[in-house]
Image (spheres, rainbow, N blue to C red):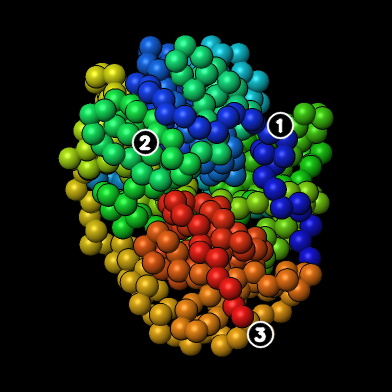
């Protein structure tokens, strides 16, 4: 299978690399923020604006994680969410959900204007569309429920897409932007006056003392009164967030489209094979069209190249666009459909988390920053109770039972199922799980016939990793950690790499 697009996020490819220092000596600040994505960057910014000294600590580079691999829609219309929220949480909580996401978009817009940030921020209408009668019924129900909540939605019968729809729900005045341009611009305002930004600095644990101690892989520590962890899934297993969410992976392709042919709004379909569609202005004056979809639980599909292929085919057949980029991302999906924003556990008075954004992380990242900065500053926040991370969570749902059973089945079953007996069975360009002297080994043979072998046991909680063909990585199907063929961490919550193994 030959894929056309280059395997890199457009947002990262169209921005210059950042170069903040690695933390090498112990320091002290008011607040340490672990994770340099959108939630972490905005949290640090709001706290510094309020007079706090902050240290933003990123294991890789600013904006190169989940926030740099999104479709970057700033929305409160999250496909079909409001009917479900009313059923599960009641009308008032559903209303607060919509209100808080719209407030987050407004807060981001104000920050962009105040700081004069060039990040291609554009107000756009946002549509969730159906292409069959079953989807149409769900769309109409969402219109009715959302309007009853006071949201400015309306039903439309057509949109400016090159195919027929049966109907759509529209939310006006939402937004899109270039997320990494924004994050880099905000990060640049943080250093100085006792505040810092650190890259290539992996945090391994946090001691919730008074003050807290953030301990890094290199041994240097950050002492802080409060710590905020914004690492997609918290790197700390305390709080069981890995059991209250599951990791969902999705895919995006992009290519240039003639401006006269480009869709003018943001779109997402309903149903199992939905497509997410948006455009972005490029620095050379052209228009980039992005199409996303093909989501699945992390580690559940080895043939991920086929998912990219289907999106590339869609881009070409539906819009006549040649794919130039392809990338993927993942997020933690909350079982009760609400993010977890607040203290790590009831016993942790100074360590905070933001996770479970459920594929809608842009507005929710800003929302998290608003809620957590208010919490640290001792201010009341109208949405804090709704999203409190320590709230009782309904583990016993059809989805949670299924996902957690899958984790348990993987944890036990992978230890007994027959794996390939020899690395000789691994062909060039292929990754396989093998058993060597009683150990589970993740073996990859590169195009030069060089064999790369690491432990197949994820250091997070001991699940067996799975091969990701399109992205040449080992992915943990239990909680979403991902590793290179050399065992390097590509995605947490793991804070240790896969152990190197020698198969002689």
Residue drawn at the location 40% of the way across and 45% of the way down: 204
N-term mark: 2 or 1: 1
Gap in angstroms between the C-alphas marked 3 and 2 = 44 Å
Q: Which mark is residue 16?
A: 1
Residue 310, image x and y in percent?
A: 68, 63
Q: Is residue 397 left or right of residue 478?
A: left
What crowding class fits label 3: few (fewer than 14 Cα within 10 Å), some (14-19), or many (20 or more)? some
Location of mark 3 (residue): 425
Please name which of the two marks, 3 or 2, marks the residue nearer to the observer: 2
Residue drawn at the location 61% of the way across and 61% of the way down: 486
Labelled pair 3, 2 in contact (Cβ < 8 Å): no
Question: Front-most of 387 and 478?
Answer: 478
Question: Front-most of 253 and 437?
Answer: 437
Q: Is residue 436 above or below residue 450?
A: below
Q: Is residue 262 left or right of residue 191?
A: right
Residue 294, image x and y in percent?
A: 58, 60
Gap in angstroms between the C-alphas marked 2 and 1 = 29 Å
Residue 217, image x and y in percent?
A: 46, 44
Residue drawn at the location 59% of the way across and 44% of the way down: 69
């Amino acid at each position: 299978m030959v894929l056309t697009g280059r395997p890199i996020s457009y947002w990262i490819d169209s921005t210059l690399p950042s170069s903040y220092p690695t933390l090498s000596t112990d320091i002290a600040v008011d607040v340490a923020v672990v994770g340099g994505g959108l939630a972490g960057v905005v949290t640090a910014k709001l706290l510094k604006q309020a007079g706090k000294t902050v240290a933003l600590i990123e294991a890789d580079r600013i904006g190169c994680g989940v926030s740099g691999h999104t479709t970057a829609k700033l929305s409160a219309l999250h496909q079909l969410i409001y009917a479900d929220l009313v059923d599960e949480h009641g009308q008032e909580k559903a209303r607060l959900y919509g209100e808080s996401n719209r407030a987050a978009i407004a807060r981001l817009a104000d920050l962009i204007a105040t700081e004069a940030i060039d990040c291609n921020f554009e107000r756009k209408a946002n549509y969730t569309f159906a292409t069959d009668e079953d989807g149409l019924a769900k769309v109409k129900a969402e219109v009715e429920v959302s309007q009853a909540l006071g949201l400015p939605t309306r039903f439309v019968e057509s949109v400016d897409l090159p195919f027929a729809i049966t109907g759509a729900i529209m939310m006006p005045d939402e937004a899109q932007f270039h997320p990494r341009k924004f994050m880099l611009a905000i990060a640049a305002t943080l250093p100085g006056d006792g505040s810092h930004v650190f890259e290539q600095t992996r945090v391994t644990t946090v001691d919730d003392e008074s003050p807290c101690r953030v301990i890094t892989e290199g041994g240097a520590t950050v002492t802080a009164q409060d710590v905020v962890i914004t690492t997609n899934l918290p790197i700390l297993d305390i709080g069981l967030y890995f059991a209250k969410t599951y990791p969902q992976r999705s895919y995006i392709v992009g290519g240039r489209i003639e401006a006269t042919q480009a869709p003018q709004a943001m779109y997402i379909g309903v149903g199992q094979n939905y497509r997410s569609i948006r455009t972005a202005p490029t620095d050379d004056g052209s228009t980039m069209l992005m199409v996303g979809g093909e989501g699945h639980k992390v580690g559940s599909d080895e043939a991920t190249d086929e998912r990219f292929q289907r999106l590339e085919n869609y881009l070409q057949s539906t819009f006549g666009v040649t794919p130039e980029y392809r990338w993927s991302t993942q997020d933690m999906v909350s079982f009760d459909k609400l993010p977890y924003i607040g203290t790590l556990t009831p016993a942790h008075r100074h360590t905070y988390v933001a996770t479970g954004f459920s594929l809608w992380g842009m507005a929710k990242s800003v929302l998290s920053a608003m809620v957590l900065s208010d919490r640290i500053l001792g201010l009341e926040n109208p949405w804090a109770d709704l999203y409190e991370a320590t709230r009782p969570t309904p583990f016993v749902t059809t989805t949670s039972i299924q996902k957690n059973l899958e984790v348990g089945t993987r944890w036990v079953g992978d230890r007994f199922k027959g794996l390939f007996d020899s690395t000789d069975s691994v062909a060039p360009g292929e990754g396989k799980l093998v058993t060597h002297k009683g150990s589970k080994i993740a073996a990859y043979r590169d195009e030069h016939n060089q064999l790369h072998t690491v432990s197949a046991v994820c250091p997070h909680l001991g699940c067996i990793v799975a091969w990701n063909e399109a992205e040449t990585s080992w992915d943990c199907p239990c909680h979403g950690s991902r590793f290179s063929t050399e065992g390097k961490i590509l995605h947490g919550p793991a804070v240790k790499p896969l152990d190197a193994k020698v198969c002689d």
